[in-house]
Image (cartoon, rainbow, N blue to C red):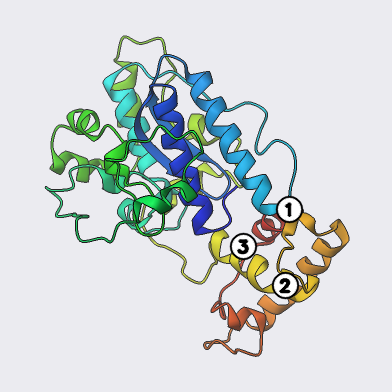
Amino acid sequence: MFRCDRDYIIGFNYLAESAFHTETKLLADGFMSTHWHSIVQTEDPLAFVKRDRYAYTRYFNALYGRKGRLGEKRAFITEIDGIHRLTAALNYVNRQGLHHGIAATPFGYPHCSANAYFRKDLGKTSDVLPLILPERRYQYLLRDSMVPDSCRMDINGLLFREDIIDTSYVEQVYVTPRNYLFQMNKLSDDRSIDEQKKEKSATPLITIEVIEDGTPDFDVEQLLRNEQGRVNKSKMTDMELCRLIDGFYIPWLKKKDDQTIYTCTPRERETLFDMICRDLTRYANTRFDDKRTLVGRAGLSGKMATEAQLRRCLIL
């Protein structure tokens, strides 16, 4: 669903657009290559989800030359009632990068809201960042945008999360910056479940299994091990692998700039699968980027990808 930085930028911006259009308060978000999560306060969750998914699908299909629905037919929606349930949900969404083994801490993953809260207390400022010119904002927003001009946008086109998210509400949930840091760095155990069970609420318990079940390569034990923060730097991220495929292998195969993985035939994708598997194995122990190879030109010599990951990024 997200193959490059621009996809993640548009993904969040359209989430913000949908929130303003449906009078929804956004509390947290987390984007991964294959799915995304958001926690919101809204009177009409279906309208919010429908607008968000429709807008992003149109963008993605136009960019990559594909057709049809993007993702599953129905989005996963669950009601959250209870402070402990809400805290568990916020923790999970903000720790996306950590749980999926991409970042050593929640704050090291840029495509989530972990860095939006307690910014002053945690020494995070954004005033020094260059802002995009007002006349260029339209490139990263919908035509009928309701995002106020007061919401800042960085030079890459990304709306500032701290301007979009209701950070004051979330900060009240965590009470103090110290507790927020504790929640972001603690290991998951049964204590959160026990606290939720004590609440007088008929809504489902918030667990990793409930929120994440059904996503590609779901393995709850691996997600929990990733909480240790030991990132495997020799493994490509999905975005690195997609950049290798989209920026190097497809142009080499198709000889045209406007071709994408979705315009390749199934046979061409299988050819790419065999070729990339061979090249990654051949250069697995290479410690320098040999510019004579496509892997080297991408700056990914010495990195590997799993077969399931490669098939997913090749749409096989």
Position of 247 with respect to 211 (left or right) is right
Q: Secondary structure at mark 3?
A: helix
Residue 163, numbered label: none
* Residue type (three-letter) at the residue carrying disc 2: Pro
Position of 26 with respect to 126 (left or right) is right
Decide which of 293, 281 is in the foreground and name it: 293
Give the quarter of the image for residue 93: top left
Give the residue number, with chain letter if any, for mark 3: 242
Position of 207 with respect to 263 (left or right) is left
Residue 315, numbered label: 1
* Residue type (three-letter) at the residue carrying disc 3: Cys
Q: Is residue 144 visible?
A: yes
Q: Is residue 284 visible?
A: no
- Give the image location of residue 268, x and y in percent: 84, 64
User: Which of pointers 2 and 3 indicates the residue nearer the eye?
Assistant: 2
- Give the image location of residue 150, x and y in percent: 27, 40
Q: CA distance from mark 2 to mark 1?
A: 17 Å
Q: CA distance from mark 1 to mark 3?
A: 11 Å
Decide which of 289, 53 is in the foreground and name it: 53
- Give the image location of residue 113, x and y in percent: 34, 43
